[in-house]
Image (tube, coloured by chain):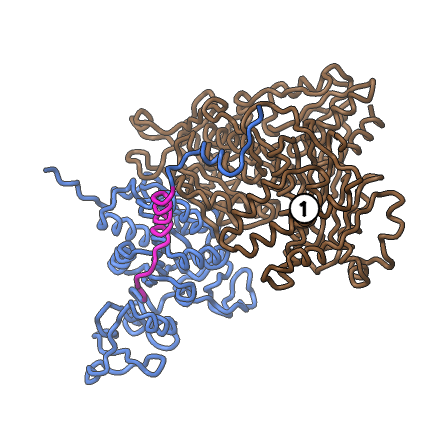
Chain colours: A blue, B brown
Amino acid sequence: MTEKPKLTKKDFTSDQEVKWCPGCGDYAILSATQMAMSKIGIPPHQVCVVSGIGCSSRFPYYVNTYGMHSIHGRAPAVASGVKLQNPELSVWIITGDGDGLSIGGNHLAHILRRNLDVNIILFNNEIYGLTKGQYSPTSSPGLKTKSTPYGSLDRSFSPAKFALGAGASFFARTIDTDPKHMIEVFQKAHAHKGTSLIEVFQNCVIFNDKVHDEYTNRKTRDDYTVRLEANKPMLYGKDQDKALIQDGFGFQTVPAAGNEDKYFIHDPSDANLAQILTQLDGTNGPIPLGVIKEDKDHVYDEDFHQQITDQKNKMPPADIKSLLFSGTTWEVN
Amino acid sequence: MKDIDQVVIRFSGDSGDGMQLTGSQFSNTSAQMGNDLATFPDFPAEIRAPQGTVAGVSGFQVHFGSIQIHTPGDEPDVLVAMNPAALKANLLDVKKGGTLIINEDAFNELGFKKAGYEANPLEGLEEDHKVIKAKITTQTKEALKDIELDGKSKARCKNFYALGMTYFMYSRSLDPTLEWIKEKFAQNELLQSANTMALKAGFHYAETIHAQANTYSVASAEIEKGVYRQISGNTALAWGFIFAAQRAGLELFLGSYPITPASDILHELSKHKHFGVKTFQAEDEIAAICAALGASFAGALSMTTSSGPGIALKSEALNLAIMLELPLVVVDVQRGGPSTGLPTKTEQSDLNMAMFGRNGDSPAIVLAAKSPSDCFHMAFEACRLSLEHMTPVILLSDGYIANGSAPWKIPDIENDFPSITPQFATDEDKKEGFLPYKRDNEKLCRKWAIPGREGFMHRLGGLEKENETGNVSYDSYNHELMVCLREKKVAKVCDFIPEQVIEGEVESETLIVSWGGTYGSVHEAVKKFNLEHDKTVAHVHLQYLNPLPKNFESILKQYQKIIVCELNRGQLKEYLNGKFSLNALGYSKVQGKPFKVRELIQFFGKEV
């Protein structure tokens, strides 16, 4: 018996030179994705990576699988066609905050609503990078950019609230400075049946450097983030010394010690809990990282093919001639 | 009984009066009785426009005869007007001396007001027309008095009463419609008998009042032997696609978004899932074409169906398909434009958009169907060219042929159509590493390598790519090479399409050029013109617009005068004038309606 050779990151690395800016968070996300794919163990020819337009969307060129760098905002629609035509493929969508939530907001909403079995990695750097620094739909109000010299007037989009509002069956958040966490989250996303949306806090060194600084620098990160794990209490802080506990329809932070009886246990299948967790946006407690929501629901591509199978079983064998001769015909002699 | 060779009837009423159904019943019956025919449904964009107003008038015209019929007819011989608005909207079209069947019940003060008449329009009508007044609503209700239905439901059967009257007048058999009623209302006996009784009552009423008057008999037409059916352009497109997919051995994927007048293709294909047809109603026009393109990448025969405003939205994704060099069929069922324009009316004004509506030098194959039944053939052709040449095809239809129907001799699918052979990547192609943009010499086509196959992994994208490898390249000379390769590839398609046929009198000084859905009218006009005049005309009708047939230029150069007839402001004319340095004249019409044979003949008479 010959065992399949184990896949490594190299199997998922294309021969193309990667052309992001030095120090860009995209490198780490690319590497984590390649690692996750090799750990998952799907052969590269059964993977298809589809992207839109933007810095992050150059991603498919660097992954040695099938791939398509499509048009701005439309990757979810292109990927839907790929998945519906061949449900055996592992389909990954790469998008950014501008691509996915601005020009492509409609398609992102609808793929989440339909719940196709695909994985979406949304690189959120709160800025337009490839067009050289305009504010994006996730930028903080007041942000001064080239297109908003006096400060942005837009209220910002929360990808988490957007996802849950659209009926996402899986939403997770991770961060470009933590490869181990990214790899874990990507593997979980792949294991989930249905659309998995992963928001990655990604740093743009050129146009919006340190936008996620409080979640990434060693001094503050432990106090500003909470790592969620299913069936575990929500503890955070340098020595896991703080606990998030329920407070009406929200959370409050208490010392971990002495409050064991009030610990709140994370359950990604609890839709109400997921809703409350989306309220935590970094201004009112730590920001949750990890799988925020995961529940089972109808998977569109499965139902799509089941309906075809059902019709094939129900109807007489498909015959083009009987189609042409169906209904009223008459003979001219 | 009088024998005549052709009749045009227009059924006209409120958009809720069932005129489309009445008209299609009349055509089905006539087709089954061996007549040749053409139909023209003409209805408002609103589902139920304000009752009784001219805006809400819905019409269905049938032209049937014992001769070959190419158009739905210029002027109705008979107008059925279910209310004053229907009379107002159509009276000017009716032939002098023609017959008007009037539903007297609707001709009251309220009806006149809604239609915008100040006085009773029936007064004085008899001077130029034969007027048959009938209290159609009252008589229908009276005929159904013993049926346990409410008054409103009874009144709704009045269209079958009117249909019955026309059946008597043209000696139609009641059987096909009776059979249809039986099937349609199999679950509802009350409606079954109500409609049956209304049809018969109308027939008998006409018999009674016209006992002394003329009735007409239209003999069977001399048509080619074979088995026939009725088909509309939209249904024919859908079936043509299913057939092409089967012929190519591929699954059919449709990404579509509802839009008038193209939605019926989505409806029809959605019914045939047992053929393995995949239909995806996307969230918008853009997603529809993008999903189709994704499915094409993954190995489907893919298509998207829409109309002008939707095609405008799709142009970016269509351009991506041209760049990726993947097969994709894009159907544009043209309607009046610009913008939302005239959603339910016909026009040919998307030609420029199909030819040029994309950024960059971006050629697409452009085809146009010429009649409802030709849609089957052209759907097949669109799929064949797209799959065998690895590039998108835009197939132009229009509102007139999409909704109009005509008898169709069911083709011999085994022998009447060529094979479709897409070029898939083979093991040979991966021996030294697969090159996704390596081309063959004959067609300049790249190979189709479908995700899931080992050894052919590649990345496609909208960025310019290096020749052969497909890797991103910004090299200026490579870009020029690739632009020219894509251009040549489409130009080479002319070696794989039929040569242009000349109709009419080949030996003439003047050539009439037409394209797409106007074939019936122009063909008929040319035929009649040549019969009536000493100076004759030749005619070419284009179905392949880009590339043009190989012999097309030499045909143009044979004629001293060229007249291009089209339902737009001269788009093909301008194109030909520019491309071939011609001085062609145009005959243009943008009224949301097909050409009338008479207006074409008049123009030819003036110019030839």
- Is residue B180 positioned above or below B421 on the image? below
- Is residue A108 positioned above or below B607 on the image? below
Q: Which residues are magenta?
A: A293-315
Amino acid on which the number 1 mark rests in the picture: Leu
Residue B327 at what x, y percent from top left?
Answer: 46, 35
Q: Is residue B209 magenta?
A: no
Q: Quadrant of the N terminus of chain B?
A: top right
The one nearer the camera, B205 or B161, is B205
The one nearer the camera, B94 or B449, is B94
| Subunit bearing disc 1 | B
* Image point (47%, 22%), residue name: B415
Residue B151 at what x, y percent from top left?
Answer: 64, 63
Can I make out residue A61 in this image? no
**Going by the image, does B82 lie left or right of A19?**
right
* Image point (36%, 66%), residue name: A213
Residue B87 at what x, y percent from top left?
Answer: 78, 50
**Going by the image, does A159 lie left or right of A32?**
right
Question: Would you identify the image quadrant in which residue B369 lies?
Answer: top right
Can I make out residue B454 in this image? yes
For the stretch drawn in magenta, what is the main secondary structure?
helix
**Going by the image, does B93 lie left or right of A192?**
right
Q: Which residue is mark 1?
A: B163
The one nearer the camera, B354 or A259, is B354
Residue A150 at what x, y percent from top left?
Answer: 56, 68
* Image point (37%, 53%), residue name: A300
Question: Would you identify the image quadrant in which residue B552 lies?
Answer: top right
Question: Which secondary structure, mark 1?
Answer: helix
Question: Would you identify the image quadrant in which residue B596 lies?
Answer: top right
The one nearer the camera, B528 or B361, is B528
**Going by the image, does B401 lie left or right of B52?**
left
Q: Say how many tags the image has.
A: 1
Q: Local crowd at mark 1 within 10 Å, few (<14), some, or many (≥20)?
A: many
